[in-house]
């Protein structure tokens, strides 16, 4: 498998083409910026190696504790961590689930009522959806997925070159 430095270099090298493709596809500066920033985040911070002691894992610094349960549940290089389709989706769901639990816990400690937490969280979702819009939220997910997918595609390519097998990642 390629090293962490190789994955980082590929992410950096692909940033300009991703920005150009986003600009050509959408023609909007905001969407281009979101896709590009999310691509960098996906490639450098949100890649499939969060289930090991890796560069992306170390970049989370003190916040990497949120990835500990993920590391214990997912086997490294399984289709659930490195999978081209489900890998990033599971990390997004996991990450936002953990963030939601932490935010709800903090808010519950301050508010003292589950109903207040649910109400506030629904309002936050509504306001962020109205403020950002579905297009930017989808652009953020697409960029994150592309960044993480660049890691998986690199792994698949190297595995295929070395062994002729790709099945574990798809």
Image (cartoon, grey):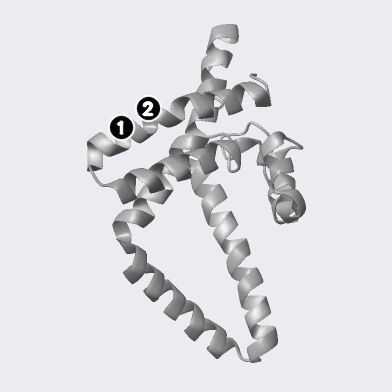
Q: Nearer the viewer, residue 92 or 46?
A: 46
Which residue does the numbered mark 1 point to in the structure image?
Answer: 21
Q: Quadrant of the N terminus?
A: top right
Whether residue 116 is situated above or below residue 47 in the rendered picture = below
Crowding at label 1, few (<14), some or many (≥20) Cα neighbours within 10 Å?
A: some
Whether residue 73 is situated above or below residue 119 in the rendered picture = above
Q: Nearer the viewer, residue 90 or 120?
A: 120
Whether residue 63 is situated above or below residue 51 in the rendered picture = below
Residue at 56%, 48% in the rendered image: 91
Residue at 41%, 29% in the rendered image: 16
In the displayed structure image, the side of residue 116 where residue 58 appears, left or right: right
Crowding at label 2, few (<14), some or many (≥20) Cα neighbours within 10 Å?
A: few
Q: How many marks?
A: 2
Which residue does the numbered mark 2 point to in the structure image?
Answer: 17
Residue 70 x %, y %: 68, 49
In the displayed structure image, the side of residue 40 where residue 32 appears, left or right: left
Q: For numbered disc 1, what is the local secondary structure?
A: helix
Q: Quadrant of residue 25?
A: top left
Q: Quadrant of residue 2?
A: top right
Q: Nearer the viewer, residue 145 or 13?
A: 13
Q: Are marks 2 and 1 in contact (CB under 8 Å)?
A: yes
Residue 170 x %, y %: 48, 29
Evaluate whether residue 84 shows in this view: no
Residue 46 x %, y %: 58, 43
Residue 71 x %, y %: 72, 45
Disc 2/disc 1 C-alpha distance (Å): 6 Å
Evaluate whether residue 27 shows in this view: yes
């Amino acid at each position: 498998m390629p090293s962490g430095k190789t994955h980082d270099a590929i992410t950096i090298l692909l940033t300009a083409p991703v920005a150009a493709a986003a600009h050509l596809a959408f023609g909007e500066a905001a969407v281009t910026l979101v896709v590009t920033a999310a691509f960098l985040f996906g490639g450098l911070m949100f890649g499939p190696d969060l289930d090991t002691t890796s560069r992306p894992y170390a970049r989370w610094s003190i916040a990497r504790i949120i990835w500990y349960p993920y590391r214990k549940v997912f086997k490294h290089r399984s289709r659930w961590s490195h999978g081209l389709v489900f890998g990033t989706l599971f990390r997004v769901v996991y990450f936002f689930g953990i963030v939601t639990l932490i935010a709800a816990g903090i808010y519950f400690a301050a508010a003292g009522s589950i109903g207040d937490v649910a109400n506030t969280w629904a309002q936050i979702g509504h306001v962020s959806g109205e403020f950002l819009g579905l297009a930017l939220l989808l652009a953020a997910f697409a960029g994150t997925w592309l960044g993480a997918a660049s890691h998986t595609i690199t792994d698949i390519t190297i595995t295929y070159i070395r062994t002729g097998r790709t099945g574990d990642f798809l």
